Every structure is written in C-alpha cells, then in structure tokens.
Image: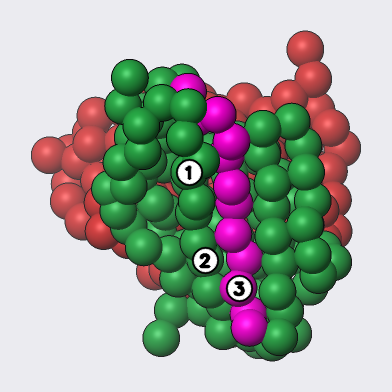
Amino acid sequence: DAGITQSPRYKITETGRQVTLMCHQTWSHSYMFWYRQDLGHGLRLIYYSAAADITDKGEVPDGYVVSRSKTENFPLTLESATRSQTSVYFCASSDPNQPQHFGDGTRLSIL
Amino acid sequence: QKEVEQNSGPLSVPEGAIASLNCTYSDRGSQSFFWYRQYSGKSPELIMFIYSNGDKEDGRFTAQLNKASQYVSLLIRDSQPSDSATYLCAAIGRVQGAQKLVFGQGTRLTINP
C-alpha cells in the first residue's frame, strides 16, 4: 500500500545506547521530515531532507543523526540516547510547499 | 515569540454548535496554511489547507485566512463528538533561514454530547 510507515511503533531502551528509527515512504515525495512531540512543546522539527543525500537541521537537532541514501528512506539515529529524548517521534513527507503527510509515529522510552 | 500561536484550550463546545479555532502567525512572508487534526495517541491528519485570503469550505469545515491581520481560523459546523481532538495550525515559514512547515502547539477541542 502507498503511504509512509515508521518502525518500530514502540521502543524501550537504556541511556547511552544507540537507537535507530526507520521511516519509509512510497509516494516518491522529495521532502522528508523528522519531528518529536512532547507535552508543552507541540511538534518540533529535528531534521529534514529535500532530496536524497541532502539533509539539514531543524529546531532541535542535537543528539540526532540522519541519512538519506535513497529517496524513500529517512532513518533517524540517536547515537547515545538520553532520558530527555524520551518522546513520540513522527516522520512526514511531502512535495515542495505541499502539505506534509505523517507516519503513525514511534513511541520511544529511554530508561 | 513563537512563529505560529494557538490557544492551547481546552475548548469545550456542545454537540451541534459551531467550534471556532484560531491561529496567528508572525512571518508575513508565509503563504500557505494548514489545519491538522490529531486524535489522542495518533498522528496528525491534514484536514484543510488555504493559500488565499478569504474562506475555503469543505463539508462541515471552513478555513479562513486574513493575511493583513496574520490570522487563520478553522470553523467546524454541526460539531460531533468525533470532532474531539487536538487541532494543529501550521504555516510555511522560516526556521533557521530556510523555508519550513511551522506548527502551533495545538488547541484541544472537546465536543460535549
């Protein structure tokens, strides 16, 4: 089915571990985005990508790494997880200046 | 000042009434505006977008844009309990100098039967 899928849906890990959240879209959208959503802060942009091999920082990029070797995939890695990174993470995709469409989210807990 | 501001609510409206959700934005260069609905534990879902001044209607939903006042609103007519959700306003603005979709914090709407 066409759409945007995130995996895993839920993840529990420990501080200091590396965690990778996956995002895959089948629309061939050029843009992809990673957000985190926390109570009191709404949706905050972590990183985005305008095309394969092009990525850029958003509002809250510290502690995260992204890559985009293929148009359809945009993984987000927490290199050394911290408790403050406990959040719900959403991936989204769009064409330029068009509405973004969101995946179902990954609920990440860091103990 | 946040680029997109919404009253966080909660906004409580009786079933069948009109729910009015408001949003202001600071970037005068913003051209495109979106309303997303987010049910608890779910992802944001696009329900309306508006690019031009005035009203845009889609079923029970009407989006209103006033660029001079930097104001966007969403009206929901004949409110239903299933409309209870958080509504996110978003504008294409600038984050760190580049064009991005900027979200407000959302307004939590409750429709009372």
Question: Which quarter of the rendering shows the C terminus of chain A?
Answer: top left
Q: Which mark is residue B23?
A: 2
Secondary structure state at the residue bearing disc 1: strand
Using a 10 Å C-alpha cutoff, classify the residue at mark 2 as few (fewer than 14 neighbours), some (14 to 19) or many (20 or more).
many
Left or right, residue B73 beside residue B6: right
Kindly tell me whether residue B37 is visible in this rendering: yes
**Residue at mark 1:** B19
Q: Nearer the viewer, mark 1 or mark 3?
A: 1
Residue A37 against residue A12 in the figure, above or below = below
Range of residues picked out in magenta: B69-80
What colour do you see for chain A?
A: red
* Position of residue A15 measured from the top left corner of the image (x, y, whole percent): 17, 46
> Which tag, 2 or 3, sits closer to the chain's start?
2
Q: Quadrant of residue A14?
A: top left
* Position of residue A24 measured from the top left corner of the image (x, y, whole percent): 68, 31
Chain for numbered disc 2: B
What colour do you see for chain B?
A: green
Left or right, residue B57 beside residue A78: right
Q: Residue at x 49, y 54 (%)?
A: B21
* Position of residue A50 measured from the top left corner of the image (x, y, whole percent): 78, 60
Of residues B56 and A97, the one nearer the viewer is B56
In magenta stretch: residue B73: yes
In magenta stretch: residue B71: yes
* Residues indicated by labels 1 and 3 sit on the same polypeptide chain: yes
Specify the farthest residue to the front: B17
Using a 10 Å C-alpha cutoff, classify the residue at mark 3 as few (fewer than 14 neighbours), some (14 to 19) or many (20 or more).
some
Secondary structure state at the residue bearing disc 2: strand
Q: Residue at x 62, y 65 (%)?
A: B72
**Residue at mark 3:** B71
Question: Which quarter of the rendering shows the N terminus of chain A?
Answer: top right
Circles 2 and 3: CB atoms closer than 8 Å:
yes
